[in-house]
Amino acid sequence: MDHFFNPKSVAIVGASTKQGKIGYDILKNILQYSYSGAVYPVNPRTDTILGQKAFPDLLSIPDPIDLVIVSVPPPRVLDVIRQCKEKDVDSVVVITAGFKEVGGAGSHLEEELVKEIKEAGIRLIGPNCLGIIDTASFLNASFAAGMPLAGHIGFFSQSGALCVAILDWALGENIGFSKFISLGNKADITEIDLIRAMADDENTRVILGYLESIEDGHTFMNVAQSVSKKKPIIMIKSGTTSAGAKAASSHTGALAGSNTAYNAAFKQCGIVHAHSIQELFVYATAFASQPLPKGPRVAIVTNSGGPGIIAADACDLSDLELPSIKKESVERLRSFLPPTASFYNPIDIIGDATSERYKKTLEVILADDLIDAVLILLTPTAAIDIVETAEAIVALAKNTDKPIITSFMGERKVRPGRKIFQDNGIPTFGYPEEAVAALNAMFRYRQWLNQPEKEFVRVEVAIPKVRQIFASVTEQKRSDLIEIEAREVLEAYNFTLSKNILVNTTKKAVSAASEIGYPVVMKIASPDVLHKSDMGGVRAGLENERMVEEAFFDITSNIRQRLPNARIMGISVQEMVRGGREVILGISNDIQFGPMIMFGLGGIYVEVLKDVAFRIVPVSVEDADAMIREIRSFPLLRGVRGEPAADLLAIRKSILALSQMALDFPEIIEADINPLVVRPEGKGAVAVDARFTVQE
């Protein structure tokens, strides 16, 4: 990818003599920002553009060309690509719109474009993009208004319009970039290629991305997991609602994945997930300029109690901690702070604090080995000299390996201080909550870096048996397994099942109940009845023969009345499992990432409370443990008010078995085990009910 970011020569096909035309703006940007390579405008209707000799076509240029920027009408783009092939050009940026994003003929044209570049061995960014910028080589091959400052943030976006807005905002905030790339339709080069390139770029410390879709979810995760161990990757994903997904599809022709899948994927591969553009750059400015905290322990230094409390509340809602500082540190603070100051965390040096008081307090706090990071809050009182305080903080930051984050609250009076911070790589935010969010993201990334290599386990299972069951189902032109089939699948993957006997007469039901032992549960067995309880197809707590007889009649009558065409294969008589916590496990398929495993609170409440966690297959041992602890109801599994803890190892084993099943059988569209009754610690778990939907 070197010719995209450090080309020795650039040709602009479609360069224009008219101001306001994209071809004019691109050429002007390349010329005016000190790019040192050769520049070749291509336009058959003129001899010179902006003082540069123009050529009628690429083949007329006598010298080798590293990079070609294309800004001509869509029908002419393929001819340009053919000239690139003849000229041995290997890197092309197609600015032109009118391809996949407009559908119809545009989609067909993009298919032809991809075919041409594959045959020619050309790498391509776009089409339908803003262009690319590399500050190290002073290359601005875009039609953006302005050149970003040099910095250590590598940014890419599928939206060119968003690039323009972010660039303007970044110039106003003095935020620098190493690379700034508009991906457009991603006909060839994708976020995966750029993450790889930025991983090896010495000028890039932080990788930022705005995504509307990911076409190859598993490759994306593999690359991101590897790169995120070297550099932080911060992403924002749009199209996470049904309305947003529809907008994404019409915008770039992308088929957006579900927010659930992206959340899971980002967690599993160490990506810092930003949920807004503001959050994206809040995180980026901190990661790009400060060392990571060694731990979660934060000290807050403030000249006002209110902001300190706000920051403390934000810390309490995060993974950060506010420890007490050392006794020796308190004694040192007492030697120069007023008696009315707060000597504990948050450390309030009160409203008449001067720059010297801030300086001396920070010296004490930074020397305290119980503190991993410092958050400095300031409100512009009459006593404080903003510039002197900012300069003192900058000087201290240069001599510590602890991250320092600032929030100088206000606007006009604190602006000079913020400018000093921006010029010296100290993250500064308008509000304490933003500062805490940045620190929390940094700490969580530190945790990711400290994680050991993930452990994936595989156990012996009866794959041929499951393959036979699925084949039988599809031969019968069914997609849903009946319960007896679902139980056989679970049994093949070593799940413990409740006792079960399938019967088709009242007499056999009574006999089965006696064999299993009262109380029992009875359920309809039909591929056409998915939600058995809703259809009156379940009776629980049956204590005697009469109740079993009545249940058999009621269940069959209910189903025949409500679903007269349903295929009834019998009634399942089951052991009534007691004495455990009900959880749910499931498989669902995401169009971009493939199978996902779900875990959460079970029974009838899962759809109401939605207290669930997801991970993309394959699920590691560490992922499974994280899923269990992620749900809000985890304290119930751990045991409360004297109740025994649930068997967490049995839950882990079940999650891993289901993950292995999803890998072995991609034809599973969806499945759930609801409930899985988890017994007390060391007693295992029992699968009570299950549902599978498969396709050929």
Image (cartoon, grey):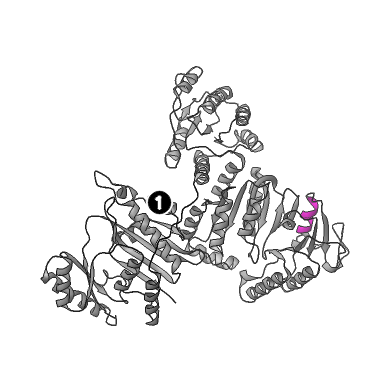
Q: How many dots with numbers?
A: 1
- Which residue shows up at 86% across the image and 62% down it? 63
Q: Amino acid at mark 1?
A: Asp
271 up-or-down from 674: above or below: above
Q: Dominant secondary structure of the magenta stretch?
A: helix
Query: Dot 1: what SS?
Result: helix
Categorize mark 1 by other alpha carbons within 10 Å: few (<14), some (14-19), many (20+): some
Outermost residue toward the top in this view? 335
Residue 448 visible in rendering: yes
Q: Could you tell me which quadrant the C terminus lies in?
A: bottom left
**Range covered by the magenta-colored residues:** 26-32
Locate residue 314: give its quadrant. top left
Place of residue 539 in the rendered image (x, y in percent of width and height, measured from the top left): 20, 68
Outermost residue toward the front in this view? 460
Place of residue 298 in the rendered image (x, y in percent of width and height, measured from the top left): 48, 34
Place of residue 514 in the rendered image (x, y in percent of width and height, measured from the top left): 14, 69
- Which residue shows up at 40% across the image and 68% down it? 670
**Residue for badge 1:** 625
For residue 183, side relative to residue 84 (left or right): left
